Image (cartoon, helix red, strand yellow):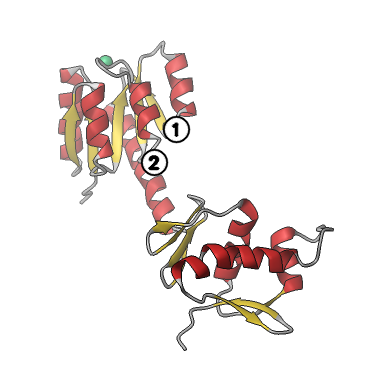
Amino acid sequence: MAEERILIVEDEEKIARFVELELLHEGYRADKAADGRTGLAMAESGKYDLMLLDVMLPGLSGTEVLRRLRKTSQMPVILLTARDGVMDRVSGLDLGADDYITKPFFIEELLARIRAALRKKGRGEAVSDVKRLGKLSLSEARHEVTYDGHPVELTGKEFALLDYLLCNQGIVLSRDVLLDKVWGYGYMGETNVVDVYIRYLRAKIDDVYHVKLIHTVRGVGYVLREDHG
Ligand code: CA
């Protein structure tokens, strides 16, 4: 039985009620909001797996709800648009809607879109790209590095270098390998660039959190591992 929670933001009570009953019948859990502000607040609670969002709403339009929501959340959103709402659909997809459906719609089609959006979300979680070493974690999708929950601000190259080190943690990597993998074969700059960026990473992680993750292997290169000694 599906246990996903779906938020219906729709001011037309008849449509909202009809969709709610169908969703409950399919085994989803469902809640309703009848205006944009309430819908946004509910969506931002993080309790929902997917939102059905009407575009023409009192208070805050559906596109405005989506624009604000996308600052903090990537939850799947399916827009409910009017037949002549071409611009709504275009701007909705630009703003990060996952899909849209034109009213009036067949409930089977809406259910199929919901299943597809939830599957997409599920796959995203299944292939979670978070790499960890101790309290250090890196997400390529979110382009985010944290240490013990604290954000670590890295430049693009620092991020790429740390990403490669994390993928190969415990393995000693030579400067040449790091240069090829992170800077690319065509790199023509200074050969000590690897050492420079290792220093940057140490300054932002090892030094700040008083740990030793990036180790120098004299005459060989570098290795990322937790120091248990
Ligand atoms: Ca409406």
Query: How many tags in the picture?
Result: 2
Residue 73 at x, y percent in the picture: 36, 40
Tell me if label 1 and label 2 are in contact, CB under 8 Å. yes
- Residue with the mark numbered 1: 96
Q: 185 and 91: which one is in front?
A: 185
Q: Residue at x 51, y 70 (%)?
A: 206
Q: Residue at x 17, y 34 (%)?
A: 31
Local crowd at mark 2 within 10 Å, few (<14), some, or many (≥20)?
some
Q: Residue at x 38, y 64 (%)?
A: 148
Residue 99 at x, y percent in the picture: 41, 31
Q: Is residue 182 visible?
A: yes
Q: Viewed as shown, does residue 46 lie left or right of 182?
A: left
Q: 87 and 186: which one is in front?
A: 186
- Residue with the mark numbered 2: 74
Q: Viewed as shown, does residue 220 lie left or right of 203?
A: right
Q: Which amino acid type is shown beneath numbered disc 2? A: Gln
Q: Viewed as shown, does residue 95 lie left or right of 42?
A: right
